[in-house]
Amino acid sequence: METKSPFEQFDELKIDNASKTFLLEAAKWTSFLAILGYIGLAFMVLGALFFIFFGATVGAMGSSMMPFGGGMMIGIIYLLFAVFYYFPISYLYRFSSNMRNALTANNQASLTKAFEFLKSHYKFMGILIIVMIAFYILAMVFVMVAAMGSATM
């Protein structure tokens, strides 16, 4: 008698009606969040362009409110954030559209693609969080070193 490993049991994994309902609702919400993300992305790009083009004018007028070259640096930073922001939003939207297609057309390839995009979304967010934690740790170390340096003066 041949016994199957626990992983082989999932070769015939089925999605029942309750799971379909939950996945379809999740797809609707992720679509909504992705659309809001794209709107936020558009505002970030507009803000970046504003700082790049008009921040230079304010800086040229001698305002001390705009450090780092009169807004040019702030605009570039906004653009960089917009580029990083695009990827998780794109993965989320692709998950949503593929999941809807998979559930409405019973398309296994779209279901697999949807889960691939969901995995990519969470992988990107996880890596981003790790990078941010490392950045915060480095910033704290830098602040402590700077504080100790200024205390000895």
Image: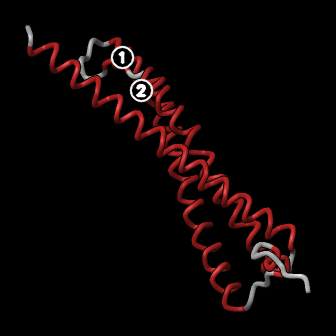
Pick whichever, 54 or 40, lies toward us.
40
Name the residue: 49% across, 26% down. 76
Which residue carries the number 2 mark?
74
Say above or below: 97 vs 38.
below
Q: What element carries label 2?
A: helix
Residue occupying image coordinates x 76% and y 84%: 15
Question: Residue 136 lies in what quarter of the image?
Answer: top left
**Side (left or right) of 4 relative to 77:** right
Residue, x 51% and y 37% (percent of image)? Answer: 81
Question: Which residue is at the far front?
Answer: 1
User: Residue 35, position in %: x, y?
Assistant: 59, 60
Picture disc at residue 68: 1
User: Residue 104, image x and y in percent?
Assistant: 80, 81
The type of colouring in the image is secondary structure
Q: Closest to the observer: 91 or 41?
A: 91
Q: Where is residue 28 in the image (x, y as percent from the top left)?
A: 62, 74
Left or right of 70, for residue 101: right
In the displayed structure, 89 sits above or below 66; it is: below
Q: Which residue lies furthest to the bottom in this view?
A: 17
**Residue 64 image position (x, y, % from top left):** 24, 17
What amino acid is found at the position of numbered circle 1 in the picture?
Answer: Phe
